Amino acid sequence: MRRLIFKSLLAFILLFEVTVGFSRVIVNDSVDSVKLLKPRSDEVYHFSGDEQIHTVNNYLRNSVKTRVVDHGGRPVEDYPVCFRKVSAPAEVSGFSLHDTLVYTDSSGLAATRVKLGDKPGQYEIAAFLHGSAEDHFLVYRFYAREKNWGFFVIVGLLGGLGLFLLGMTMMSEGMRSAAGGRMRSVLSHLTHNKLVAVGVGTLLTTIIQSSSASTVMLVSFVHSKLMKFRQTLGIILGAGIGTTITAQVIAFNLTNYALLMIGVGFILNFFIQSQRVKYIGRIILGFGVLFYGMHVMSQSMEPLQNHSPFINVMLKLETPLIGILAGALFTALIQSSSAFIGIMITLAVQGLLTVEASVPLILGANVGTSATALLASINTSNEARKVAIAHTAAKVFGVLLFIWWIPGFVDLIRGISFIEGNAPVNPDALKSTPRQIANAHTLFNVVMALILFPFMDHFARLIDGLIKEKEEQEKPAFRTVYLDRNVLRSSAPLALNLAKEEVLRMGNIVEEMLRHVIPPFFERDASQLDYIEQKEKEVNFLRDRIKDYLLRISRQDIEEERVNEAFQLIYTVKEFEQIADTISVNIAQKARSWCSSDLEFSEEGKQEIADYHTRALKQLSRAVDVLREVNLEKAKQMKKKYKKYRNMALELEKQHYERLKEEVSKSVTSSKTHLELLSLLKIINERATNIARILLKWSEKV
């Protein structure tokens, strides 16, 4: 119907022109001997002027051109060509043509300038040979945008990127929560088997969705002396592979199902009581938000499809050095190679990014992702800095290896993108640029892992040689060893693991205090009491730091089991701190007074105090072991031991009173101190046992 109306309009125009008359007359047989073409140029984009996009009330950047040629393809000079408006948005004004009748030049070209109207939308004009039949015409289409279209492109990109990153975060949190405590035990199961380490790195990064976060954790663990630098090399290689899994999923381009995933994920997360199902719902919800963010970015970038400056920039990215630098810089800014690959896939969906341009960007993204670990390694130990340097060196080595082979690598990617398992698939879909981008990202990291894996020991020695031991600087009086805010921000379960290690260190300090506080009563040497006083200050320091760290963890959006564990550790810290107070404030002060006096215990009294002191030390040591191993059986045994030690204290007091009845002089003069020591050691036994009680209590809740 539209074509019929259009032909009728042209017929009317021709009839009008014939009626009015023109200075030149073109006979039908001469019209039939020539034809119109839209000229093309490999050097000028939109050379014919067709399909241009510009803002309202502006002339198009390129003139609209048509070429008149004869049947031999030779240009025809001085031939009249008519241009007419065909369609425009409703109620438009300002839409005009500079010339409506133009004669061709020596190259057969006739051109006119077009001014768009004041309404956004599609505009059309027609070019036809003067005096021709109605079938001899060409249609040119243009698109007008609002003046502030660039603002909406930026807003759409930022909003879409925000949704994309939010989806990744939700998906990562869901996976980490579903993994639960098992992820925390990953490190404890590490062996010196390099292949196992690669597998652990792949699994860890798949769960947390970020090789940068994995490497930051490794920096923290090495700095905290939970791991050795050489143990991290296999995990680093595995992390590179793990981060490509997200890109493979994104490449399926499930944006049509994004809202469905959001709906299903919302229902599972908010209406189902099962905690495990909630975690799965959060994962699905994260995927939905991620793909919806890609959809928003894709829609926002549609105006860029015909924006010449942007297209020229994208073409320049095919230059390897420019592409690598751009990929590295952008990935370093957003601190996520997965997010950057997602943006690349979105550009590819819109046809704005070629495989040739994407490969340098992928190489740059793999270098840029190491920036986060480098920043995290500032002010850390040499061993921790080696982790960040090794991660960066491996990525740079990979780029230097592939940069000379980019054309061949592109051909290889195009070849393997047909192979997607045994199931019947659509070859055109698998041959698409998004899938090729994901495959290139995966292949790069897998090849790098295969190349470096046999030479990990040599690579470690190289890094050791690059990072020399620095001179020991004066350390602060007190410091935490395991607490790390980088891990606190990236993984609450792993932060709990670090907090527990710090609590165990605190327990060991309290144990040392108890070991050194009784000998001054027997040896009359007060020098150890200064050591105890200093350690008590350190315990108070650790109490404040650990408590603050654990409260920060509990305020995060974590499952109830992790919150309970955080409070369990806070109660344990409280017990350790009160034991330290009992040692330093009560026992140590009595020891100072004792050392300056001439009082003595009887031999039997010495033996009783020493024996009960040993029992208190054992009970405190058991408490530390129970905390470390989460051993419920040993916790129950501690409760039985406490009853035995409580009865033992009563028996020792009875024996002391027997000596008082016999008027043993040393027992009489030391009676007050003797009984107070037994009472204080019994309190220490009780508080150590409370640590086991706390564990048993929270275990019953779970």
Image (spheres, grey):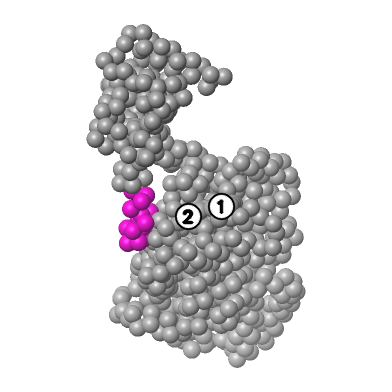
- Name which residue lies at 35% across and 61% down: 320
Task: Say if residue 234 shows up in the picture.
Answer: yes
Cβ atoms at labels 2 and 1 below 8 Å apart: yes
Residue 287 pos. (x, y %): 60, 48
- Is residue 72 rendered to the left or right of residue 168? left
Q: Which residues are magenta?
A: 312-331
Whether residue 421 is situated above or below residue 68 in the rendered picture: below
Q: Quadrant of residue 526?
A: bottom left
Front residue of 199/179: it is 199
- Is residue 259 rendered to the left or right of residue 474? right
Question: What secondary structure characterizes most of the magenta part?
Answer: helix
- Name which residue lies at 46% across and 51% down: 344
Q: Secondary structure at mark 2?
A: helix
Front residue of 342/215: it is 342
Q: For the residues marked 2 and 1, what is the alpha-carbon distance in whole angstroms?
A: 9 Å
Disc on res. 198: none
Q: Which residue position is annotated with label 1?
A: 250
- Is residue 609 rendered to the left or right of residue 118? right
The quadrant in which the C terminus is found is bottom right
| Mark 2 nearby-residue class (10 Å; few <14, some 14–19, many ≥20) | many
Q: Which residue position is annotated with label 2?
A: 341
Indicate whether residue 319 is drawn in magenta.
yes
**Amino acid type of the residue that numbered disc 1 sits on in the rendered structure:** Ile
- Name which residue lies at 33% across and 8% down: 20
Task: Say if residue 59 shows up in the picture.
Answer: no
Q: How many marks?
A: 2
| Mark 1 nearby-residue class (10 Å; few <14, some 14–19, many ≥20) | many
The quadrant in which the N terminus is found is top right
- Name which residue lies at 45% across and 15% down: 11
